[in-house]
Image (cartoon, grey):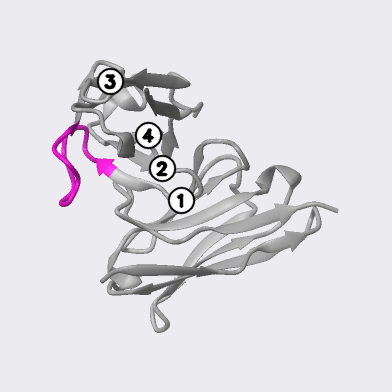
Amino acid sequence: EVQLVQTGGGLIQPGGSLRLSCAASGINVSTNYMTWVRQAPGKGLEWVSVIYRPGGTYYADAVKGRFTISRDNSKNIFYLQMNSLRAEDTAVYYCARGVSSLDYWGQGTLVTVSS
Amino acid sequence: HSALTQPASVSGSPGQSITISCTGTSSDVGGFSLVSWYQQHPGKGPKLVIYEVTERPSGVSDRFSGSKSGNTASLTISGLQAEDEADYYCCSYAGSSTYVFGTGTEITVL
């Protein structure tokens, strides 16, 4: 059974940094495309970032230069490092397997950027 | 890329068929056969119901079907059931290895 378990998140001040983790079981993150999606409170889904199987990384314009997606194959975990956080980054962040079709999702973790 | 345009809400009676549209441009929906649809119940995470425009994942009811014409993709739910009441989002490849979601549609079963 595939499971994606997310950790990290919480309350952070504007300008701060936070790292989200997504631990996978039942799949190898090294051989899968992995994606981050977020959802601001009461709003729709927003695509954030993807890491390709060979290692290429891509970002939405809203987070480019501030967020970094990565993975640790030995731990079977992938990450979203978020720097220079802004109030508009407040959202539930989901990790998911895939790129054009996201078939397994993590439980989501809330990130609140506020002073 | 701007979010793809979906109607804010659609409603139908049990047993009816409803269709949700997802309108983009030739740079996203119209340019690629990489449109997916997600169902999200309140307080829950999204669930994939259609991928690559028309394909249905294993375990998803055959009451869900997808199509595309030009820059508009559509999700049809036939034989509407109470459990189908949820928010639905389309998502399309937008070039340069990026993706864009739709604005979301709330489905109400009357």
4 vs 3, front mark: 4
Q: Tell me how far mark 3 sits from mark 1, CA to CA.
A: 23 Å
Per the image, the residue denoted by label 3 is B19
Q: Secondary structure at mark 2?
A: strand
Per the image, the residue denoted by label 4 is B85
Residue under the point 30% across and 73% down: A28
Q: Tell me how far mark 1 sits from mark 2, CA to CA.
A: 6 Å
Per the image, the residue denoted by label 1 is B44
CB contact under 8 Å: marks 1 and 2: yes
Answer with mark 4 or mark 2, whichever residue precedes in sequence: 2
Per the image, the residue denoted by label 2 is B40
Residue B35 or residue A107, whichever sits in front: A107
Q: Magenta residues?
A: B49-64
Q: Secondary structure at mark 1?
A: loop
Q: Is residue A41 left or right of residue B78?
A: right
4 vs 1, front mark: 4
**Residue A55 seen by the camera:** yes
